[in-house]
């Protein structure tokens, strides 16, 4: 979903599926939910506020992804510098 998007903002969305939102520039997610999503945000510049769990987040290029929980953050085998951060929201 939405690979290579630029300037995309998603508000109150429910995202389902594998490898969403990769290679995006200036991506924003506000109060969104991700269901059964794995390998999310690969090589994306992203600011995200995600409610609930994300199965996996892989090599976010830059920005901050705030989630309630995440199964796995993958930071390896990158073809470019990836300095994006994942923050687990305190309950």
Image: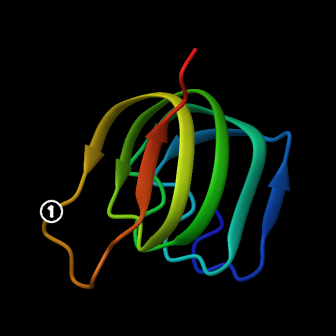
- Among the 4 quarters of the image, the one containing residue 21: bottom right
Q: Residue furthest right?
A: 11
**Residue 27 in picture, x, y percent from top left:** 68, 69
Q: What residue do we see at 30% from left, 45% from top?
A: 73
- Would residue 61 appear left or right of 9 to someone viewing this image? left
Local packing at callout 1 (Cα closer than 10 Å; few below 14, some 14-19, many 20+) is: few
Q: Residue furthest front?
A: 90
* Residue closer to the observer: 89 or 49: 89
- Would residue 19 appear left or right of 1 to someone viewing this image? left
- Among the 4 quarters of the image, the one containing residue 2: bottom right
**Residue 22 in picture, x, y percent from top left:** 50, 68
- Among the 4 quarters of the image, the one containing residue 72: top left
On-image quarter of the C terminus:
top right
On-image quarter of the N terminus:
bottom right
Q: Residue furthest left?
A: 77
- In the rendered view, would you say 40 is above or below 62? above
- Would residue 72 appear left or right of 2 to someone viewing this image? left
Q: What residue do we see at 59% from left, 80% from top?
A: 4
- In the rendered view, would you say 11 is above or below 33? below
Element assignment for label 1: loop
- Would residue 47 appear left or right of 74 to someone viewing this image? right
Q: In this figure, which colouring scheme has been used for the structure?
A: rainbow
* Residue closer to the observer: 81 or 78: 81
**Residue 54 in picture, x, y percent from top left:** 48, 33
- In the rendered view, would you say 45 is above or below 66? below
Q: What residue do we see at 53% from left, 22% from top?
A: 90
Q: How many numbered marks does the figure carry?
A: 1
Q: Where does label 1 land, which residue? A: 76
Q: What residue do we see at 53% from left, 58% from top?
A: 64
């Amino acid at each position: 979903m939405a690979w290579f998007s630029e300037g995309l903002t998603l508000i109150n969305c429910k995202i389902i599926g594998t490898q969403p939102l990769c290679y995006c520039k200036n991506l924003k997610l506000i109060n969104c939910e991700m269901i059964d999503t794995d390998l999310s945000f690969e090589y994306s510049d992203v600011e995200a506020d995600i409610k609930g769990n994300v199965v996996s987040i892989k090599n976010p290029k830059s920005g901050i992804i705030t989630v309630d929980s995440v199964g796995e953050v993958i930071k390896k085998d990158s073809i470019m510098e990836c300095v994006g951060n994942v923050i687990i929201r305190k309950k």
